[in-house]
Amino acid sequence: MDKQIPKISTLEAVFDIREMLKSPIVVFEKYRKKMGPTFKFRFGIKSTIVTADPEMIKYVLKDNNENYHKSHIQTKYLVEFQGVGLNNSHGDYWLSQRKHLSMGFTPGRLAETLPSQLNTLNEFMSEFEIAIKSDSVDMHRQMEKFTIRSVGRSLFGSQMKVADYDRFAAAILEIQQYILKKIVQPYLKPWFIISGKDKKYHKIREEGDQLIMEYLKERRKTLGEGNDILEMIMTTPYKGTNECMSDEKIRIEILQLMVAGNETSSTAATWAFYVMAKHPECISKIREEIENVFGDAPIDYQKIHQLTYTISVLDEAMRLYPPFWMIDREAQKDDEFKGIKIPKGTTVVTYIYGAHYNEEHWKNPEKFDPSRFNNADSDKNHPFSHIPFGGGPRVCIGQNMAKTQILLVISAIVRKYDFSLVDNTEVGMQAMMLIKPDGPVNMRFKQI
């Protein structure tokens, strides 16, 4: 039986274009609340199914994931600037890269890299303590500064210079903004070429590529002395072979890991601090938990995961503001889910933000409530009703590293400071590839 799902008319979609460019979440939420968790939407001539149903999301991302490949947005626009790597490949090549790179993100590997992460945190805190002496600081900018260095230290160890971290962060931001323009304004492609914009941003990319290749060249002189992901990639052969990854493949994978790792962690950390500032009762409870778990002792990998209340606050912040607000896939063959026909070529938008606010799975979803994740009922939640890092085989490879980094910086700051927003104006969401604040997140800090 062919199950009919609500369909947004072409005329309605046309009227929504301006709002879609400004804030697609506003449009999707309007229709989700009006028509239910799954509906059809048309982007130009492209047939699209949008779903905030955790069961259908599970089907697309996990149960039948082989039929749902990343869309042309990721396989075309991102490849242009990032090359073909883990984030935008499929099939045997993707599986081989995933298995190989995942060795760098095991709990054991993360525990081994904690000392270098703590060095990065201490360096950041020294600068942070100076920055907060001014009237206020933009917490999003501070988290970007911390995470690019933290991710860079995980990848390169102590090899990469702080100035180069900052260069990468600036380049990543510029290129991501340009990619977004090309996605939402494809009709301007000739102008991008004629005006020299394409050439400008490809030059920025080439400078980043060259910098990575220089680091690879230098690392080959000292192989065996490092304890970071780059060292692992360069010295570990693919399983069942004696072949290690080529420098060209390493360049692509390292670049993709830096881009994804920096943006995911910085965005999630920013929203976590924003939520805590809006609910200051959390700050004192987190501080009490840190004191109970660590006392005056240094932070270590095992104990940081004993911060159960802190983790529940972070999980709730990522429910309200998931780093990945949607994941798009394209059906490779005709398919069907519970009577819903999904023809070959259909784009399926797994609408993560909508799933996180789906009233069938979350009571009072607009309310901040960390107890959702630390009570007896939390295990009853549908596993795909809370997927801030995606789900299925292609779940973010660095999610554990990202959560560890965020817990580190929360612990360091909450131990020493109370903080509040400069004003109580709501910070808006800018739904780009991730959900980012639509402006600065200005906060004041006071040492306790």
Image (tube, rainbow, N blue to C red):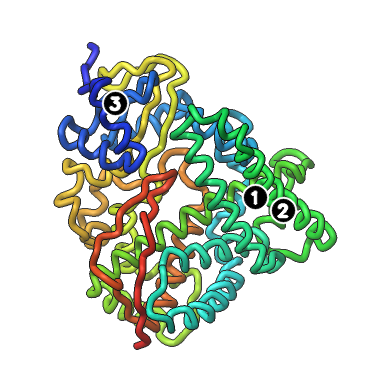
Q: Amino acid at mark 3?
A: Val
SS under mark 1: helix
Crowding at dot 2, Cα within 10 Å, few <14 / some 14-19 / many 20+, comes out as many
**Residue 396's spot in the image, x, y percent?**
48, 47
Would you identify the image quadrant in which residue 39 lies? top left
Label 3, label 1: how many angstroms apart (C-alpha)?
40 Å
Residue with the mark numbered 3: 14
Residue with the mark numbered 2: 212
Residue with the mark numbered 1: 254
Label 2, label 1: how many angstroms apart (C-alpha)?
8 Å
SS under mark 2: helix
- At 22% from the left and 33% from the top, the residue drawn is 37
Judge from the rendering whether residue 146 lies leftward or rightward of residue 363; answer left or right. right
**Residue 370's spot in the image, x, y percent?**
24, 62
**Residue placed most toward the observer, 220 or 272:** 272
Above or below, 206 against 161 in this view is above
Q: Amino acid at mark 2?
A: Ile
